[in-house]
Amino acid sequence: MPYPPLPTREEVIASLDAMLRTAERLETPYRRWRIRNVFPESLITGILTLPIAPPAIGLGDGTRASYNDKRTFITPALRAKFPSLDLLAQGFSDPEIVDLFARTLGIETEGAYLRAEYIQDLDGMWLEPHRDIPEKLFSMVVYFFTGPDSAEWGTDIYDENRRWIGQAPGEFNGGIIFVPGPNTWHGFEKRKIIGVRRLMEINYVRPDWRDRDQLANPDAPLRRR
């Protein structure tokens, strides 16, 4: 019997639909949405039990691009190998969900592509304050971490002067969404990570995205309903 049992495609789509419809919009220091109960827990269990080890990268330099060759993007090859990752990609590629992202965030998602990364940060990892590039139509992180200190592992938020404002709550199966802009500074201040800081980053990216090997389905642009 396959373990763990996974949700249906319809259950994943329903969970994403409910997440977007109940997202809490925040305006300071920039517009973002706090999200909760993003995925069915059985899907998260299916991802957390995958035989994918955290990358050994040594001391971080404050960026993820410095170890691109060790990152875990949900590619067609991984989707074919791991049903849980395929289900996640199917959910975000569903035309109803693609349309709901467009209406909720005020962006055009027709013709975009899905880029999703499974991240497993170890102690020593940090991210300098940065803004995402405009080729990302939106940036979304969903936290999969647990443990006594994990509530403090949320994304750090900064104002337009890169002054630290606070953290997104490090809530399991919760996270944030924002549309990249001139003041959307965020990062991860260096702090102790006991265990593994697991999360999923989701982006819809513009059709001219150069790194096609990072896309969940590089031959099929997203369509709205």
Image (spheres, grey):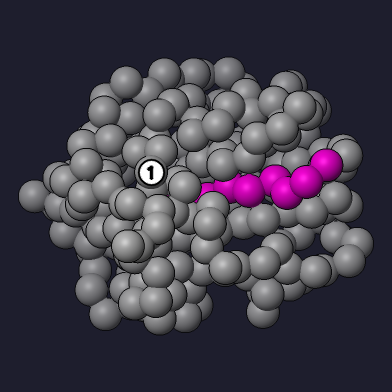
Rendered residue at 8%/50% (across/down): 225
Residue 198 shown in magenta: yes
In this view, the residue farthest toward the front is: 1
In the image, 210: left or right of 91? right
Residue linked to disc 1: 42
Residue numbers of the magenta segment: 194-202
Q: Position of residue 153 (x, y in %)?
A: 72, 34
Height in image: 162 above or below 180? Answer: above
Q: Is 69 drawn above or below residue 44 in the view shown?
A: below
Q: Nearer the viewer, residue 145 or 138?
A: 145
Q: Residue 74 lies in magenta, yes or no?
A: no
Residue at the spot 33% in from the left edge and 30% down from the top edge:
19
Q: Position of residue 124 (x, y in %)?
A: 88, 52
To which quarter of the image does residue 90 belong? bottom left
**Residue 168 in view here:** no
Q: Quadrant of residue 57?
A: bottom right
206 is higher (above) or lower (below) than 215: above
Residue at 76% x, 27% y: name it: 148
Foreground: 140 or 75? 75
Left or right side of 211 for 68: right
Q: Residue placed at 42% from the left, 20% from the top? A: 25
What secondary structure predominates along the stretch shown in magenta? strand
Look at the image and tell me in which quarter the N terminus lies.
Answer: bottom left
In the visual, does 100 lie left or right of 86? left
Position of residue 211 measured from the top left corner of the image (x, y, whole percent): 50, 77
Sort mark 1 into few (<14), some (14-19) or many (20+) by Cα contacts within 10 Å: some
Mark yes or no: residue 144 visible: yes
Percent across and percent down for residue 28 are 58, 18
